[in-house]
Image: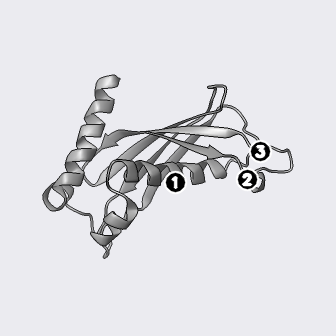
């Protein structure tokens, strides 16, 4: 799945490059779009009582980005461990250069903060994430 973000002026710093913290925001935007594209958007998950806090984020910055540049963010499931999901992000500029490689790890919890039994309680969502994780593993 790909998501495109246009670098906004307010996301740049005094050196006219994108401030590093914005890449994490872009990951969030891409993750929300990714979940929607696979049929499990946030309103649906929240209606089901599922919350998905971030447990870990890593970013490996490769090249600076600047105002008005269009950045394509490719999102993939790197690993799915039942209650935890690891997503990978490859961000590229319009020239096709990688500007950032990143990952995020998320948990699936109920409204009380307890881990959700995905396979048992949400088999359709569990199956979709498992399929995506298996497909990613086969590509490696």
Q: Quadrant of the N terminus?
A: top left
Task: From this view, report whether residue 66 is shown above or below residue 56.
Answer: above
At 24% from the left and 39% from the top, the residue drawn is: 131
Q: Is residue 92 above or below residue 47?
A: above
Numbered circle sitting on residue 59: none
Q: Secondary structure at mark 2?
A: helix
Q: Residue at x 32, y 64 (%)?
A: 45
| Label 2, residues with CA under 10 Å away: few <14, some 14-19, many ≥20 | some
| Residue drawn at the location 31% of the way across and 71% of the way down | 47
User: In the picture provided, is 52 more to the left or to the right than 25?
Assistant: left
- Say which residue label 2 marks: 11
Would you say 42 lies left or right of 120 here? right
Q: Position of residue 67 (x, y in %)?
A: 77, 45
- Residue 87 x/y as whole percent: 41, 43
Among the two numbered marks 3 and 1 on one chain, the one whose residue lies closer to the N terminus: 1
Which residue ends up furthest to the left in the rendered image? 120
> Which comes before the other along the chain, label 3 or label 2?
2
Q: Provide residue 94's location: percent of width, then percent of height.
A: 66, 30
Rounded to the nearest angstrom, the CA distance separating label 3 from label 2 is 8 Å
Q: CA distance from mark 1 to mark 2?
A: 15 Å
Contact? badges 3 and 2 (CB < 8 Å):
yes
What separation in Å lies between label 3 and label 1 (alpha carbons)?
A: 19 Å
Residue extending farthest to the bottom is 112
Q: Quadrant of residue 71?
A: top right
From the viewer's perspective, is the residue at label 3 or at label 1 nearer? 3
Judging by the rendered image, the residue that carries numbered circle 3 is 67
Residue 28 is labelled as: 1
Which of the two discs, 1 and 2, labels the residue nearer the N terminus? 2
Sort mark 3 into few (<14), some (14-19) or many (20+) by Cα contacts within 10 Å: some
Q: Please state if 31 lies on the left or on the right of 39 as rendered.
A: right
């Amino acid at each position: 799945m790909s998501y495109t973000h246009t670098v906004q002026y307010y996301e740049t710093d005094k050196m006219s490059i994108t401030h590093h913290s914005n890449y994490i925001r872009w990951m969030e935007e891409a993750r929300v779009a990714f979940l929607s594209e696979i049929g499990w958007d946030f309103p649906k998950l929240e209606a089901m009582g599922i919350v998905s806090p971030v447990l870990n984020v890593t970013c490996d910055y490769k090249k600076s980005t600047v105002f008005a540049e269009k950045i394509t963010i490719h999102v993939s499931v790197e690993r799915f461990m039942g209650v935890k999901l690891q997503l990978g992000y490859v961000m590229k500029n319009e020239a096709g250069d990688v500007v950032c490689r990143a990952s995020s790890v998320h948990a699936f919890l109920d409204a009380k903060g307890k881990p959700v039994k995905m396979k048992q309680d949400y088999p359709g969502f569990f199956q979709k994430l498992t399929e995506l994780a298996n497909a990613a593993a086969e590509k490696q």
